[in-house]
Amino acid sequence: MSSARLERWIARKFRLRHLELLAELHQSRSILRAARRLNLSQPSVTKALQEMEKTVGVALFERTNRGLRASAYGDILARHAKVVLAQLRHAAEEVESLRAGYSGKVSVGTLLAASASILPDAIVLLKAERPGVAISVSVGTYDLLVPALLAGDLDMVLGRLPQESRSPGLIYEEFYAEPICLVTRCGHALTRRRRLRLADLSELPWLMPAPETALRRQIERAFVAANAAVPRNVIESVSVLTNRVLLRKSDCIGVMPYHVALDDVEHGLLAILPVRLPSLETPVGAILRAPGDLPPAASAFLSCLRLAAREVPRPRL
């Protein structure tokens, strides 16, 4: 079947309930859970899935011991179904916002750099102005959050903006430049040193970002540029809470965006080591899908982020 013919066939046969079912089956990976969440019977879900597979002429899901597993075709259709459903939610939000005032939902993905600085301040600003808006925050790494943004599951992603490999289909709005600092617990032997080089720290225990993060790659490049051995005694974690406790209870050296570390430094819980890392200063901002694609509540939140960014304190490194 040609792509044009398949497109016409899907347009005639697929209904909104099919899109909802596709997205839910892809998310829950279970006919039983999908039926419960959509308030349908299991036989009706099974029948609808069979109808969809007959329409497109390929298997969309496979049954396994761990539940349903989407085929490559199922992944494609589910991804597009989520985008369509997200656009319908945005349309409903715009109608409701126009009819009843401030309401709706904002779904935000955040990387480490934004989670402790502009994000909380922007949420406070938005809730003061629009208390009826619900805000959902997802924490993750760039490689997980950006696909969710493209799929329509998130309205925006906040954090350190990539220097390379930027997607032409996304907009990158820079708010401010974020330095990276090395931190330890207060009282660590290294805090008594006036000056440190990366070469002095290679053999010590480290708390690092995950290997797939841009920050981890930048740190390792900094060691190479300084002719220093890349640390091998490493704990990998992107959990802010876990990292803060580990740093306070061990002799690990941590890597943090300056404004993430600042609160703990000011409260005497952590100390910034005297190591210059100018090559690791990168912009922090928002990643968006396309101009005009934000629903009213998300657009208002973006304005709050811009205001919060203006109040970010200047680094005292």
Image (cartoon, grey):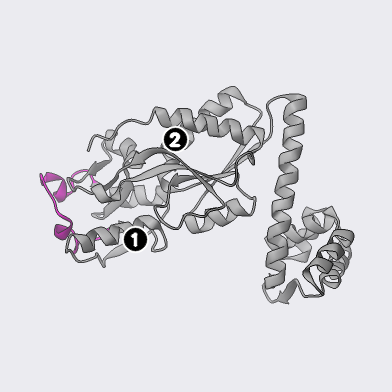
Q: Nearer the viewer, mark 2 or mark 1?
A: 1
Residue 208 visible in the current orientation: no
Name the residue carrying label 2: 118
Q: Is residue 285 left or right of residue 156?
A: left
User: To which quarter of the image does residue 43 belong?
Assistant: bottom right
Work out whether 306 lies above or below 55: above
**Mark 1: which amino acid?**
Arg
Name the residue carrying label 1: 217
Q: Residue at x 89, y 63 (%)?
A: 44
- Of 238 and 6, the residue lying toward us: 6
User: To which quarter of the image does residue 105 belong?
Assistant: top right
What x and y, as percent, mark residue 220? 28, 62
Q: Is residue 310 left or right of residue 13?
A: left
Question: Looking at the image, is mark 2 or mark 1 earlier in the sequence?
Answer: 2
What x and y, as percent, mark residue 129? 59, 23
- Give me the C-alpha separation between circle 2 and circle 1: 24 Å
Work out whether 150 lies above or below 7: above
